[in-house]
Amino acid sequence: MSSDSLPAGAVTILGASSSRRIATLVKDVVTETLAGGLTEIAMSDHILNAVLGLRSYLFEAVYENTIATAEFRKASDILSGLWEKVRERPANSSTLARSIRKGWTRPRAISSPA
């Protein structure tokens, strides 16, 4: 999923990047809380509605997406199986670790477009 697939209305209100969205939310909560005399933590209606719209989209497209959750389950099953094999034969785990390290190459930093 790319940020281009996020709901346009929410992106327009909250911001195009994660950091911009966080800044918008923090500023709004501080502003609304101060405006309310610090009696309760508050968020403006238009920001809250944008957040709820984005949240709904993320639940549908990511968190409850059957393809994504199936892939997560598959990865979890593979890792669980590997862990069980290591636990069954702890004497071989150091040999396994050395074998893995021999083939290990440090990942290169990849910069994302701004």
Image (tube, rainbow, N blue to C red):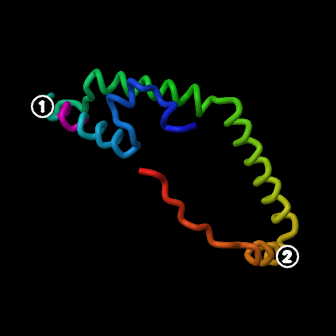
**Residue 15 within the magenta-colored segment of the rendering:** no
Q: Quadrant of the N terminus?
A: top right
21 sits left or right of 56 in the view? left
Up the image or down, 14 lies above or below 78; here it is above
Residue drawn 58% across the image and 67% down it: 108
Residue 101 spot, x, y in % from top left = 73, 75
Main SS type for the magenta part? helix
Tell me the amino acid under the disc marked 2: Ala
Residue drawn 38% across the image and 24% down it: 9
| Quarter of the image where one finds residue 30 | top left
Query: Are there few (<14), some (14-19), or many (20+) residues within 10 Å of tag 1?
Result: few
Q: Nearer the viewer, residue 92 or 7?
A: 7
Residue drawn 61% across the image and 67% down it: 107
Tell me the amino acid under the disc marked 1: Gly
Q: Which label belongs to residue 15?
A: none
Q: Which residue is mark 2?
A: 91
* View extreme (front): residue: 113
Q: Which residue is mark 1?
A: 37
39 sits left or right of 15 in the view? left
Q: Earlier in the sequence, mark 1 or mark 2?
A: 1
- In space, the residues marked 1 and 2 are separated at their CA atoms by 64 Å
Residue drawn 15% across the image and 35% down it: 34
Q: Secondary structure at mark 2?
A: helix
**Residue extent of the magenta highlight:** 29-33
Residue 54 spot, x, y in % from top left = 45, 28
| Quarter of the image where one finds residue 32 | top left
| Quarter of the image where one finds residue 106 | bottom right
